[in-house]
Image (cartoon, grey):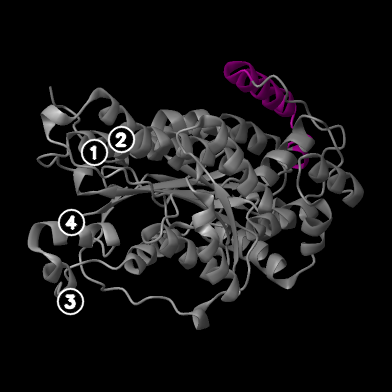
């Protein structure tokens, strides 16, 4: 996704009275300079994030830290050379250790002007390292931290040069265009995994000391001092744009997204809803192959936790084990089909749970709690693994807590939240909504309102996605 920021201070700045309560999330700002970077850090601190700010000279961050803390926020500063791979990796690891890394902003500029014949190899390389290569390192390491959490936003600050080169800006234009392409590639790869990537083009002059110096060089000191109102964009308005992008695209995990990730062509990615219950072995088998389906189709599978027992009750349905118990050869054939599916997709760790059927009320409520806590994807992975790979009895609270703790989650907290009214009500609502839309079991998929039931319908799900998705940009061109 690329977004252009118009000139002028059209967006009102957030005041301290708008400060939100602390949240269990970190925002990392790489290139936290005195203007745009600092404004971004203050915006996310006001949103309740713990901010980890980095710039080449860490001592220059002291005023920013003091201002954020005086306003009741949290900010940690660190000297950072974003061209150094080890430093970037350590910076992101530190940010993620403070609280789950949820937002990362790459804001390093590198805006220098040299006539073409005066642009040395060293100048070109150094500008590229600052404005492009450092962005690649930042995005990669941010993704490395975010993917286990199943969510996140990575933003890159662009410029007019991201779109078109100007006279005297050969090195800068090459670097910024490269950064834009890097962001586009990251967006396509990470979008299906619930990591929102956006490249914001600041197609305007920003009210900074450097810009005013440039104006003074061209028109004299009075020209810089008497800039007409609205000509320059205030750094705070750019920070507000980042805040808006985050609030619009933030999701509490992979279930019930508020908006689908975007492809860089501007078309939304096709969303497939996956209504699941951990108690279904077929839901696990779908979970195992969904990543490959996402890669093939470019679609995004949004996981929706439902209670299979509740669906059966509302539809007067029964589990296959009960419904077909007296039907000769039926259950044996179903097992044969399951074995074929496992072999076809190479799902080597699957095995029938020795405690099957397992009452999943606890772990399904836990899925909703994990969604609210922002750890939905790792929770889903952990419970499916415990149920259908490790053969654990997941309706036992102690067994469930041990499995969650072993996956790096706070099992005690998540299971405690299963008793909260909000958690119970959301699971009931998900279940009732699923039935109202036609579901009678799990796994169930929805594509543009069309329902598909069972693991064996995944091929049809993919066909529906491909048939209804917009053609990729440039398709059919030589």
Task: Determine which quarter of the picture holds residue 238.
Answer: bottom left
- What is the CA distance from the residue labelled 3 to the residue labelled 4? 17 Å
Q: Residue at x 20, y 65 (%)?
A: 7
Q: Earlier in the sequence, mark 1 or mark 3?
A: 1
- What is the CA distance from the residue labelled 1 to the residue labelled 3? 28 Å
**Residue 229, labelled with which disc?**
3
Viewer can see residue 100: yes
Above or below, 401 relative to 20: above
Q: Is residue 337 magenta?
A: yes
Neighbours of disc 1 within 10 Å: few (<14), some (14-19), many (20+)? many
The answer to whether mark 4 and mark 2 are in CB contact below 8 A is: no
The answer to whether mark 2 and mark 1 are in CB contact below 8 A is: yes
Q: Nearer the viewer, residue 45 or 406?
A: 45
Task: Estimate the x, y position of residue 196 in percent, counting from the top left.
Answer: 44, 48
Q: Earlier in the sequence, mark 3 or mark 2?
A: 2
Label 2 SS: helix
Which residue is the site of mark 2? 127
Task: Determine which quarter of the picture holds residue 227.
Answer: bottom left
Q: Earlier in the sequence, mark 2 or mark 1?
A: 2
Task: Estimate the x, y position of residue 225 in percent, counting from the top left.
Answer: 18, 72
Viewer can see residue 464: no
Extent of the magenta region: 321-346
Closer to the eye: label 4 or 1: 4
Q: Residue at x 45, y 54 (%)?
A: 32
Which residue is the site of mark 1? 172
Closer to the eye: label 3 or 4: 4
């Amino acid at each position: 996704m690329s977004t252009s920021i118009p000139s002028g201070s059209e967006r009102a700045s957030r005041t301290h009275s708008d400060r939100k309560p602390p949240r269990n999330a970190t925002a990392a700002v790489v290139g936290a300079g005195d203007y745009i970077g600092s404004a971004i850090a203050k915006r996310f601190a006001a949103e309740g994030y713990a901010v980890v700010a980095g710039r080449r000279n860490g001592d220059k961050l002291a005023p920013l830290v003091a201002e954020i803390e005086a306003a009741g926020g949290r900010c940690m500063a660190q000297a950072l050379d974003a061209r150094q791979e080890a430093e970037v990796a350590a910076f992101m690891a530190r940010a993620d250790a403070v609280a789950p890394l949820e937002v990362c902003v790459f804001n390093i500029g590198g805006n220098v002007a040299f006539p073409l014949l005066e642009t040395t190899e060293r100048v070109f390389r150094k500008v590229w390292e600052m404005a492009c290569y450092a962005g690649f390192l930042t995005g990669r390491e941010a993704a490395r931290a975010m993917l286990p959490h199943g969510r996140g936003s990575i933003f890159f600050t662009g410029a007019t040069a991201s779109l078109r080169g100007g006279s005297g800006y050969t090195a800068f234009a090459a670097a910024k265009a490269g950064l834009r392409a890097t962001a586009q590639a990251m967006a396509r790869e990470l979008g299906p995994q619930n990591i929102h990537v956006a490249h914001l083009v600041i197609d305007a002059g920003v009210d900074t000391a450097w810009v005013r110096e440039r104006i003074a060089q061209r028109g004299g000191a009075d020209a810089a001092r008497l800039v007409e109102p609205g000509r320059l964009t205030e750094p705070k308005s750019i920070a507000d744009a980042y805040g808006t992008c985050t609030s619009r695209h933030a999701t509490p995990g992979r279930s019930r997204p508020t908006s689908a990730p975007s492809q860089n062509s501007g078309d939304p990615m096709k969303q497939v809803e996956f209504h699941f219950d951990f108690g279904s072995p077929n839901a696990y088998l779908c979970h195992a192959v969904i990543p490959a389906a996402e890669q093939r189709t470019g679609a995004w599978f949004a996981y929706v936790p439902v209670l299979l027992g509740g669906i059966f009750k509302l539809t007067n349905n029964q589990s296959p084990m009960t419904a077909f118990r007296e039907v000769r050869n039926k259950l044996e054939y179903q097992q044969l089909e399951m074995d074929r599916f496992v072999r076809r997709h190479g799902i080597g760790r699957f095995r029938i749970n020795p405690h099957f059927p397992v009452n999943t009320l606890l772990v399904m409520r836990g899925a909703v709690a994990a969604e609210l806590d922002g750890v939905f994807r790792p929770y889903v992975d952990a419970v499916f693994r415990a149920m259908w790979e490790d053969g654990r009895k997941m309706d036992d609270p102690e067994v469930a807590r041990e499995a969650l703790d072993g996956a790096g989650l706070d099992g005690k907290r998540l299971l405690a939240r299963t008793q909260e009214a909000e958690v119970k009500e959301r699971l009931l609502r998900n279940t009732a909504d699923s039935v109202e839309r036609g579901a009678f079991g799990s796994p169930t998929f929805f594509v543009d309102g069309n329902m598909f039931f069972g693991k064996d319908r995944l091929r049809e799900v993919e066909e529906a996605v491909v048939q209804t998705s917009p053609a990729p940009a440039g398709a059919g061109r030589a």
